[in-house]
Image (cartoon, rainbow, N blue to C red):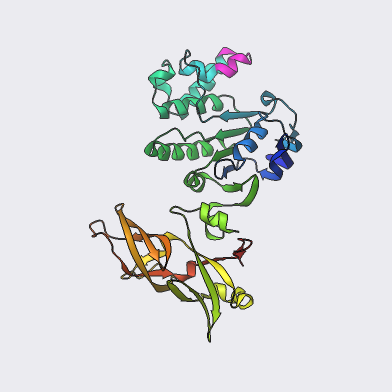
Amino acid sequence: MSGVHLSEVTKSYGAVNVIPPLSLSFEEGEFVVIVGPSGCGKSTTLRMIAGLEPVTSGSIEIGGRDVTWARPKERDIAMVFQSYALYPHMDVAGNMSFALRLAGAPKTEINERVRVAADMLELTDYLDRKPKDLSGGQRQRVAMGRAIVRDAYCFLFDEPLSNLDAKLRATMRTELALLHKKLDRTMIYVTHDQIEAMTMADRIVIMSAGLVQQVGTPREVYNAPVNKFVAGFIGSPSMNFLEGTIVDEGGLRLRGEGFDFPLPDHLKAVAQTHKDAKVTVGMRPEHFAHKSSLGAEGAVLEPVQLNVDVAEYIGSSQFLAAHLGGTKVTAAIEVGPNSAPLSSGEYLFDINRLYLFDPASEAAIP
């Protein structure tokens, strides 16, 4: 079986079980991002795939081979670390070729592989420089180049962009996506940054406390989160959560402090079984609008009263830190570039983009 497959893999440190039975499949040529908060088990999972952490139980296959107990160098993987891990006394060419020289590869093959990787990563003019003479982005390219020259079956990335500034991270995200297209290899990428996950991944694995919460494409996990954790983790700014009740007054309505909405068509069927039930209401900041807005195609806009505490200007939008009733919410309002700071008053919300969650289980309804 091609690709990378984890079957009932667990990891324990003494009596502490950090990864309960975990089964995941990464298809050949796929770019998968494992995302979650610090301590959720994502880096431990990656290190088990790499062979840097032994599994407690279960099995791992890479490219159709059982590598559960194989050493890292026997797994046909290449790994890029958060810290670059470059040799300071070697130049760029030396760093990129080190593993090949250690393996005894012919000099002509080494030079050709380094040349191809350097050209791909725009490092040709820097091959004779030491790491101390490079910028952070260039050092990260060297770390990726060292992985590329190995021509591995699978590439593993452990938060490789976290040490870079925001502008450089955005640039490197694009370069990584292009690199994946050029190499057409399986890539498994770990991060706590959901923007990295949303912009680069073919599929996203969302983890919390060692458990996989949801696996899906970026669109699937954004539009149809399976529970409150996923809904709150995916999306920037994060989804707002409010308490509400489904009431029947000649027509099903969703009522809470500061809002009273008719239930949209896509929620009416499930609401029939939840009459008079308490629910957690999810409202994404980007689905609020100014009262003058016509809304996107298919939007059903209902008025809400926002008491604005702070309006943050970011060019084409304003982020509002506000109160809806007694609950703090964030709203992202599209406005013109010369608009004055928005203030308290009537705004609109697209009720076709409402989410409902069970308060006890936190599972999505339906």
Please give the count of numbered marks on the rendered protein: 0
Q: What type of secondary structure mainly makes up the magenta span? A: helix
Compare residues 142 and 305 and report the one nearer the observer.
Answer: 305
Asked where in the image residue 74 lies, by quadrant, the reply is top right
In magenta segment, residue 213: no
Q: Which x, y percent locates residue 242?
A: 49, 65
Q: Which x, y percent locates residue 257?
A: 45, 71
Q: Is residue 147 above or below residue 7?
A: above
Magenta stretch? 98-107
Q: Is residue 35 visible?
A: yes
In magenta segment, residue 101: yes
Quadrant position of the C terminus in the picture:
bottom right
Compare residues 361 and 88 and report the one nearer the observer.
Answer: 361
Asked where in the image residue 4 lies, by quadrant, the reply is top right
Residue drawn at (74%, 32%), measured in percent from left and top?
68
Q: Which x, y percent locates residue 94?
A: 50, 15
